[in-house]
Amino acid sequence: MRITGIRVRGGRLRHLSFVEVTTDEGLIGIGSAGSPSQVIAPIAVDAPGSLLDLVRGEDPRDTEALWRRMFQGWQASRGRGGEGGLAVNAMAAVDMALWDLKGKIANEPLYRTLGGAVQPRVMAYASATAFTADSVTAGRWVQKSTEALVEECATYRRRGFKAVKFGWANYFSPADAEKMAAIREALGPGVRLMFDFGCPAYWTPGWNVAAAVRAARILEKVDAYFFEEPMSPQDVEGHAALAAVVDVNISTGESLSTLSEFRRYIERRAVDILQPDAAQIGVTQFHAVARSCEQAGILVVPHSPWSAVVVAAHLHLLSGIGNGPLVEYPAPSLLEGSGGRITRLAHESIVERPLELRDGYLQPTDRPGLGLGNYVPEALDEIEAVAAER
């Protein structure tokens, strides 16, 4: 079997591309990138020396060799282009599709292709936001009221979620502390609670380790499980300094795109949790990162709830390690309104066999590859149409 083509879909979506790798025997592998198709398509297909030029005619089962071929070939053709970034995002989507193909060719689930399951199911956490859906869509970022957040938490408990994360953005105030306390009370002590600060160093003048420590002390009072992206992702030493003096788990990783970037955190043991994203770094690199974390005693909690394809890849990857306690999954609130329509489609309609959440857990199936079948063309058309309206 040989690779014959790569197709990229996504239209005007800003945070997702959908990739298919085709073969001469009709089998198709599916993958996804965490970047827009306008960026991914030129790298994967259209540009001279594209990823397709590098992998066309090759055996799709040679995943490790093809990753090296893509990475080294792209770097060689572009000179000093840096080690990561958008090109690696494109490689990630192709790599994910190749692993899906590899499982389909062997007629086995991806977790078995990767070495077998250590844990049969993984707890899914509801990934929510502290901001109203309409304000996020409009780019205004208006925080939800305490009453709305409390009601939302009650919904998550009724739906069976045993872990919840709120994106909190780049600032912190005494009023936020009161809201966090109300959230904890609404969820109760048995539900894990996490907060994503979205890297305040990018937006908040004067943000430093001392400021992050002050925020962490508030999170400790509500028994937060982890504090996500408290510092710039390039600041390994800042993360290490913070993790050394606070009790809440410190996490980062969604903005890292190469194994060497993750190794700096792992070798320094700078965080308690690393958050690689297969839509940013691919299955091949994710697997290597997860194994290194396991040896170093660092937990792995993947980033990205945005499509069934990415979540399925993370589910299979976590199934094979003993240090992956949680997988990110869209909270019901992220599926509401016009802004949530794309996320709903990307989970419920985009593939032939969507994931099934049961009692707060996801379990990989024994169907081949990612277990999702192929993309549904009509759903891709609808997603692109919705994105064009925004």
Image (spheres, helix red, strand yellow):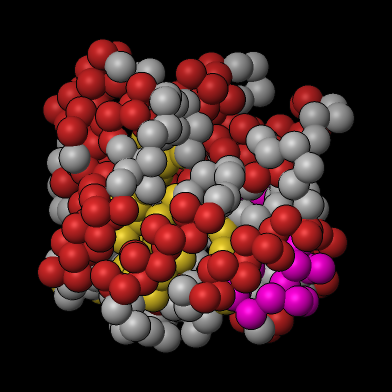
Query: Where in the figure is residue 178, as x and y percent of width and height?
Result: 43, 61
Q: Which residue is located at x 34 percent, y 65 percent? A: 182
Instruction: Confirm whether the magenta stretch covers residue 183.
Output: no
* 358 left or right, relative to 238: left
- Front residue of this view, candidates 162 and 295: 162
Q: Which residue is located at x 19 percent, y 58 percent? A: 151
Query: Where in the figure is residue 348, as x and y percent of width and height?
Result: 16, 46
What span is colored magenta in the figure? 239-258
Quadrant of the rendering where the C terminus is positioned: top left
Instruction: Confirm whether the magenta stretch covers residue 248.
Output: yes
Identify the image quadrant of residue 75: top right
- Front residue of this view, candidates 64 and 183: 183
Residue 141 seen from this side: yes
Residue 98 seen from this side: no
Task: Please state the total of marks drawn on the protein image.
Answer: 0
Identify the image quadrant of residue 360: bottom left
- Front residue of this view, candidates 201 and 103: 201
Identify the image quadrant of residue 81: top right
Q: Which residue is located at x 52 percent, y 75 percent? A: 221
Q: Which residue is located at x 47 percent, y 54 percent? A: 176
* 89 left or right, relative to 3: right
Above or below: residue 25 compared with residue 87? below
- Front residue of this view, candidates 137 and 28: 137
